[in-house]
Image (cartoon, rainbow, N blue to C red):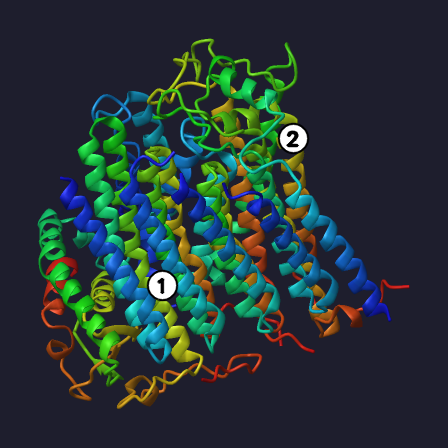
Amino acid sequence: MIVALPLAAAGLALVGFILVCMVRLSIGPTAADRAVALDTINTLVVATMVLLGAAFNLVVLLDVALVYALLSYVGTLYIARYLEGGLG
Amino acid sequence: MIGNVPFVACMVLVLLGLWALLFRRNLIKVVIGLKVIENGVNLYLVATGYVKGGIAPIYTYAPPDAAMVLPTPQALTLTSIVIGLATTALMLAFVVVIHRHKRTLDGCKVTELSG
Amino acid sequence: MSVVVRTIARILIPVILVFGGYVILHGHLTPGGGFQGGAVAASAVALLLVAVGAPAVKKLKAPFSVLEDLGGVAFVVLGFLGIGFTFFANSLAGMGGLFGAPVPSGPNPGVLNTAGTVPLMNWAVGLKVLGGLGAVLVLFGLFGGDDDR
Amino acid sequence: MTILAILQVLVLILIVAGSVLAVWLKDLLASVIALGASSLLLALQFYLLQAPDVAIAEAGVGAALTTAIFVLAIRKTRRKEEE
Amino acid sequence: MRYWTVLAAFAVVAGCLLLGGAGMRPFGAPRLDAMDQYFNARSQAEVAANNVVTAIVFDYRGYDTLGEATVLFVAVVGVALILRRVKR
Amino acid sequence: MNGLIYAFLAIGTAFNALGAVALIRFPDVYTRIHGATKCTTFGSIFSILAVAVHGIVQGGAAGGTMAVRALLALVFLLLTNPTGSHALARGAHRAGIKPFRAVVDRLEEAGHRSPVTRHGSKETQ
Amino acid sequence: MRRVAEWATTAALAFVVFLVLSSFTGKWGVWASDELLAGAVIALLVGLATGRFAWSRGGWRLLQPHRWVLFLVYLVGPFLYAMAKANLDVAWRVITGRINPGIVRFNPGLRTDFGRTFLANSITLTPGTLTVDVDDGSGDFYVHWINVKDPSPTADEVCGPFPRWARRVAE
């Protein structure tokens, strides 16, 4: 049910870039490299969700992108806090 | 158009988790395997309810005269995700306490309850 | 963590809580509901725990237990509201009054004041999930902090 | 329609890849990161399967809380998988 | 010996699951959907909710939700019992 | 108006691609954070602006809601993204990862290193 | 008194966030009355719960309206320009692979938490620089600079006009 084809094509391209980030996530020598890849994937997924919500022409789907944009960095913060030796 | 690829992918996820359960001895790895199985089962349930060309089962701002996907599998999956987090926390609490008492995470070395 | 993370947490924790409230409140109109909104609000606790540290969340354990019990009791009481017909019958929908406005059939922009007991149950379950997951996070954060090794 | 099918298959491949990494890696922190990526993409797949309710639940739980609890547990125990 | 037994059992389970997944009905064409069609068509009239999933979770299948809430409660109580502070 | 949307989409996709390539090509954690954060944030700004313009063009309550949601997601991204990158860079430095071929490292000279992490698992490159 | 002000201000800001979230529920951006009522209740609860936590030293100055205008001017003017330049810079470095990195220290002389946060996030998103650490006491910034020209730079050399903007907007 895609009604706006260019937006969906852009979303497809962003999913392709997620594939590239996945390569870094699998080979990254340290855990920090993998966490950077995860952070990048977060941003790309938010952009993909916004684009696809417009492409499906369903407003209610954009709420998911809001949740991700707001919460995705908490996981990154936990990993960073572990790396710096905190968390009690 | 894409055949049964989503169902096969769900089965692959379940098998991956099962592999971790059977052949990994680290307890946290076992919990990760259980999470992978749970992901596979959730994905399977939602994929079961998908109708080709359907829209989300919500009437707010929906386009008129569109078929909707089946809502019941989504409702079941929804509760199972939050419950899955609570049970994962329970398992990890067990793991933490076992490590505190036995100084190991190897499941084969924790032998009080075996035999 | 550094001053940057702490300040952004100061800004974002109220926003996350308001957004969780929005997701719970509009559960019957847009995607969302008690389970999702409770998880979103519990993420605010996770952010507080990581940005400020375990001592900041020490006082929150008792309120979360109370919230969880309150949510569970409210859910069962709401289920008993429709006992005249059957357990969990929606006795408020379409009756006028609280959450009782009729809803037009087919696609519509959505009216908040509909759906009977469903929004109230959303709030009960949302409080329950917030209390439960927040209590789990606080317990994990506080465990073995000072006296461990 | 075709573009939707390609998207679904691509995201499924990514989910399986992330899960393989989560099971395969020896470093538990890296394993948790891979599990987080897998759960993120799982939410995207739910989104493509027109289940926004489930996607929000997976987003709220998988983005912050699962990673948080796993990292806290690893902090309380040890990081490397011993063989 | 024990390793090979487990591996053989795993292979059998893997074969069964993959064959079952490949032999299911085609993806995107459910056969038994009378109940879901009923929910989709009637939820606005009976529950007055726009979101069909919420209507199912809290009205049609309220007992399920009650059970899940109980499981959540039990899990939280379990964590609280295990992770209580031990006075030494 | 369609031309504007296409232009925004093209810019956004190009910069997101740049971010992914930077993640692969750069030699160490800090430079990867540079590339990934800047490029994906900038690219996402334009991708989301395209959706906002699309919503405004569409008009009505649905289009307006779409534009508002997209812009709100943009604001959240702008707040959270640099913060997460900063926290990661700080964590990586305290875990003992040296910058690649650094000419100067004032942070290490200032002695801001953490004590050795409790389980002795220092990162090595 | 101060506590009541904190609660009230947080509740008001939370209400604004709720209004943005629930816009277009009435006819053409007019909010429905029940939305307003429910939003007021939620905002009041959130204000009561987080009012003590949300404000730090110097935060009150952010409420002056001319700072908001300056912030918008900053956002569409120098910030967007610097971000575009940063991305072209990264593109050039990705293609040529020519880097000369290092972590330098400078002191922009900012005192409040919000000012330091503002500057740190601006630095992270603009050309060639990435905030690695901020000293809580002295306010020293440790910045990973991808092209070190001077091992002991001043604030102007690293990030140009941003400290002045930070002082104007957030301090």
User: Mark 1 — residue?
Assistant: F84
Q: Residue at x 24, y 55 (%)?
A: F12
C70 horizontally vs G147: left or right: right
* Kind of residue at disc 2: Asp
Q: Residue at x 41, y 24 (%)?
A: B66
Badge 1 marks a residue whose secondary structure is helix
User: Mark 2 — residue?
Assistant: E64
Residue B89 seen: no
To which chain does the residue with label 1 belong? F
Badge 2 marks a residue whose secondary structure is helix
Q: Nearer the viewer, residue D61 or G93?
A: G93
Q: Give the x, y percent position of residue C85.
A: 64, 10
Residue F97 seen: yes
Query: Is E42 rendered above or below residue D76?
Result: above
Q: Residue at x 34, y 26 (%)?
A: B61
D83 horizontally vs C48: left or right: right
To which chain does the residue with label 2 belong? E
